[in-house]
Image: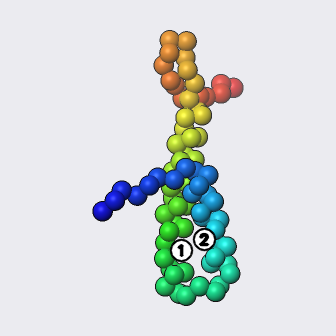
């Protein structure tokens, strides 16, 4: 079995939007709709995971000694 090609965030989002459009159209057979829905759920989770990881990376700062630390705002 070939390894599934990992899509970029933008590619995944574009595919997800196409699936939603197909499902909203309502003209596809039920079995195809179920398969598309399952694919959409997988793509949604992958996009969410990528966003979460990006957010974690953005919330880190490089300290003077070169270490990455969580960014916090002191009040």
Residue 36 spot, x, y in % from top left: 53, 74
From the image, tell me which residue sits under label 2.
19
- Residue 58 x %, y %: 60, 34
* In this view, the mark in front (1 or 2): 2
> Residue beneath label 1, please?
37
Query: In the image, 43: left or right of 21?
Result: left
Q: Is residue 33 above or below residue 14?
A: below
> Can residue 41 be seen in the rendering of this structure?
yes
| Residue at x 69% of width, y 26% of height | 75
Q: Residues within 10 Å of mark 2 (few under 14, many from 20)?
A: some
When the figure is inspected, residue 32 is found, relative to residue 74, above or below; the finding is: below
Up/down of 5 relative to 27, above or below = above
Disc 1 is placed on an element classified as helix
**What is the secondary structure assignment of the residue under circle 2?**
helix
Please state the horizontal and vertical placement of residue 48, each as a whole percent of the image.
55, 53
What is the quadrant of the N terminus in the image? bottom left
- Please state which of residues 22 and 38 is positioned toward the viewer in this rendering: 22
Residue 14: x %, y % from top left: 63, 60
Q: Which quarter of the picture shows residue 33?
A: bottom right
The reply to whether residue 48 is in sight is no
């Amino acid at each position: 079995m070939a390894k599934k090609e990992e899509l970029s965030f933008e590619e995944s989002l574009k595919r997800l939007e196409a699936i939603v459009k197909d499902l909203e159209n309502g003209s596809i057979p039920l079995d195809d709709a179920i398969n598309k829905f399952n694919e959409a759920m997988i793509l949604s989770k992958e996009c969410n995971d990528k966003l979460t990881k990006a957010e974690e990376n953005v919330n880190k700062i490089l300290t003077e000694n070169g270490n990455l630390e969580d960014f916090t705002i002191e009040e």
